[in-house]
C-alpha cells in the first residue's frame, strides 16, 4: 500500500518529465482528476448497487455486439461467429478478429449517425459540457468522447463527436486519444472476463470498473503531457444534423464505417508486423543463452512501475512482463498469460491489481487502429494525430497503472 501511495505522484512526475511545456502545469485538472478517481473507485468498489447499474449499461453495448454477430454470421459464416462445420478443439483460435470484433465499427457508425440526426447525441453533449466545465473545465465534446470510450472502442467513441474533431484544440484531441488508450470497449469485456473467470470470479465487474476509473486518470495525465490553453472554449457545440433523413444517416454512417474498417485492418497488420520484426532483430544479438525479446527486456524495465502499483518486489518482474506483453502485443494476450501464471508466482491481490493495470488498449497494435480510424474520420488533423499518437500509448499505460495504484489503496 505504501508504494501505491508513492506511485500516484511518481506517475504524474513521469508524465510531466515528457511534457511539451514543463513550465505549464494544469494543477486544477490534476487535483480534480485525482479526486474523481478516488471518489469513483470508492463508490464503484464499495457500493454493489452502482456496480449493477454499470452492468446494465454494459449489457446495452453487448446487445449491439450480439446484433452485429448475427450480421457477421450470415455474411461470413463460421468465420463471423456462425456454427462451425467441424468440431472446435480450441475456441480461442476460432475467434477471427477481422470477422468477429472489427465489424461492429460499421454498425456503431450507422447508429452514431442516426443518433446525431435524431439530436440525441447533441443533447447529451450539451449536458455534459455544463457539468464538466464546472468541474474539470473540459468541453462537452471531449467529455462525451471520453465517457463513451469506457463502453465502446477508441474509434467508435470519436465517432460520437466527429463534427467537433476538426475544431478541438491539440490538448483536447490528446485527451480523447489518451482515454481511448486507457480504457477497453464493451465488445471485449465478456471475452476478458471469461479468460479470467477461473482466477477472478467477478472479473467482468472489475474490468468495467477499471475502464471507468481510468478515464479521469487519462484526462489528467494527457493535460500534464500536452497542457491545455488557459480557459475553456466557449464556442457553441454544433447540434445540426448533416443528414437529409434517418435513412440517409444510416447509409452514410455505414459507408463511413466501411472506410474506417479498411483503415483499421491495414494499420493493424502493419504495426503488429513491425513489432514482430523488432523481436526478430533482437533475436540476432548473441547472449549466450535465451534470445533477447521485447517482453523479457521490458519486463525488467517495467518491474519498478509494477512495484509502484502496489505489487511486492518479489513479484514485480513477473508483473512487469505482463505489462510489457500488454504494451508490445495486446491486453488479450496479457490476460491469457495472467490466467496461466503458475501458482505462487503472483498473490491474489497482485492478480487483482494487474487486472486493473492491464485494462486498456495502450499497445502498438491499437496505435495502428487509432491512427487509421482518426485520420479517416478527420483527415485535416492527420499531422496532429500522427504526432500525438505515440505519446498516447505512454499516457494510456500510465493511466491504467494509476488505476492499479487506486485499487491497491482502496481494497
Image (cartoon, grey):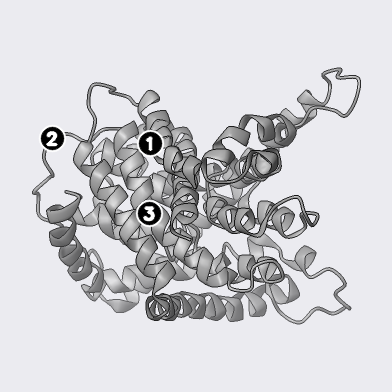
Query: Is disc 1 placed on a helix, strand or loop?
Result: helix
- The residue lying at 60 percent from left, 46 percent from top is 268
Q: Toward which corner of the image does residue 388 lie, by quadrant?
A: top left
Question: If you read the primary sequence from the N terminus, does the residue marked by circle 3 or circle 2 appear first?
Answer: 3
Where is mark 2, residue-wise?
Answer: 230
In the foreground, 289 or 251? 289
- The residue lying at 65 percent from left, 56 percent from top is 332
Q: Residues within 10 Å of mark 3 (few under 14, many from 20)?
A: many
Alpha carbon distance from label 3 to label 1:
17 Å
> Horizontal placement of 128 versus 187: left or right?
left
Residue 257 x/y as whole percent: 46, 61
Residue 400 x/y as whole percent: 48, 48
Residue 345 x/y as whole percent: 75, 50
Question: If you read the primary sequence from the N terminus, does the residue marked by circle 1 or circle 2 appear first?
Answer: 1
Q: Toward which corner of the image does residue 160 lie, by quadrant?
A: bottom left
94 relative to 316, above or below: below
Question: If you read the primary sequence from the N terminus, does the residue marked by circle 3 or circle 1 appear first?
Answer: 1
Query: Is disc 2 placed on a helix, strand or loop?
Result: loop
> Horizontal placement of 149 versus 302: left or right?
left
- The residue lying at 55 percent from left, 53 percent from top is 262
Where is mark 1, residue-wise?
Answer: 9
240 relative to 59, above or below: above
Q: Residues within 10 Å of mark 2 (few under 14, many from 20)?
A: few
Q: Residues within 10 Å of mark 1 (few under 14, many from 20)?
A: few
Q: Which mark is residue 354?
A: none
Amino acid at each position: 500500500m505504501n508504494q501505491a501511495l508513492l506511485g500516484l505522484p511518481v506517475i504524474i512526475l513521469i508524465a510531466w518529465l515528457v511534457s511539451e511545456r514543463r513550465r505549464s502545469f494544469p494543477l486544477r485538472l490534476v487535483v480534480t482528476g485525482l479526486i474523481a478517481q478516488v471518489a469513483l473507485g470508492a463508490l464503484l468498489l464499495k457500493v454493489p448497487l452502482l456496480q449493477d447499474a454499470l452492468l446494465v449499461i454494459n449489457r446495452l453495448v453487448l446487445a449491439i455486439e450480439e446484433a452485429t454477430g448475427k450480421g457477421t454470421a450470415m455474411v461470413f459464416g463460421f468465420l463471423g461467429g456462425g456454427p462451425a462445420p467441424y468440431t472446435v478443439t480450441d475456441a480461442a483460435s476460432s475467434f477471427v478478429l477481422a470477422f468477429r470484433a472489427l465489424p461492429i465499427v460499421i454498425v456503431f457508425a450507422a447508429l452514431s449517425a442516426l443518433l446525431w440526426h435524431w439530436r440525441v447525441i447533441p443533447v447529451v453533449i450539451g449536458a455534459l459540457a455544463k457539468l464538466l466545465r464546472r468541474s474539470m473545465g473540459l468541453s462537452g465534446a471531449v467529455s462525451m468522447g471520453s465517457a463513451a470510450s469506457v463502453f465502446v472502442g477508441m474509434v467508435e467513441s470519436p465517432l460520437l463527436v466527429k463534427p467537433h474533431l476538426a475544431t478541438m484544440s491539440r490538448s483536447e484531441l490528446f485527451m480523447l486519444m489518451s482515454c481511448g488508450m486507457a480504457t477497453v470497449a464493451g465488445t471485449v469485456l465478456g471475452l476478458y472476463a471469461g479468460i479470467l473467470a477461473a482466477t477472478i470470479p467477478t472479473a467482468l465487474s472489475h474490468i468495467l470498473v477499471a475502464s471507468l476509473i481510468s478515464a479521469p486518470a487519462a484526462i489528467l495525465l494527457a493535460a500534464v503531457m500536452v497542457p491545455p490553453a488557459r480557459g475553456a472554449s466557449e464556442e457553441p457545440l454544433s447540434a445540426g444534423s448533416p443528414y437529409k433523413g434517418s435513412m440517409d444517416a444510416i447509409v452514410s454512417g455505414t459507408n463511413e464505417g466501411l472506410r474506417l474498417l479498411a483503415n483499421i485492418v491495414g494499420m493493424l497488420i502493419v504495426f503488429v508486423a513491425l513489432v514482430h520484426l523488432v523481436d526478430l532483430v533482437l533475436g540476432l544479438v548473441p547472449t549466450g543463452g535465451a534470445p533477447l525479446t521485447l517482453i523479457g527486456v521490458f519486463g525488467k524495465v517495467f518491474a519498478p512501475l509494477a512495484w509502484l502499483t502496489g505489487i511486492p518486489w518479489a513479484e514485480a518482474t513477473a508483473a512487469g512482463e505482463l505489462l510489457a506483453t500488454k504494451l508490445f502485443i495486446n491486453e488479450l494476450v496479457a490476460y491469457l498469460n495472467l490466467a496461466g501464471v503458475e501458482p505462487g508466482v503472483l498473490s491474489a491481490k497482485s492478480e487483482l491489481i494487474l487486472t486493473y493495470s492491464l485494462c486498456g488498449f495502450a499497445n502498438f497494435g491499437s496505435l495502428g487502429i487509432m491512427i487509421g480510424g482518426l485520420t479517416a474520420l478527420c483527415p485535416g488533423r492527420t499531422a496532429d494525430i500522427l504526432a500525438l499518437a505515440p505519446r498516447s500509448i505512454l499516457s494510456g499505460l500510465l493511466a491504467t497503472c494509476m488505476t492499479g495504484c487506486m485499487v491497491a489503496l482502496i481494497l
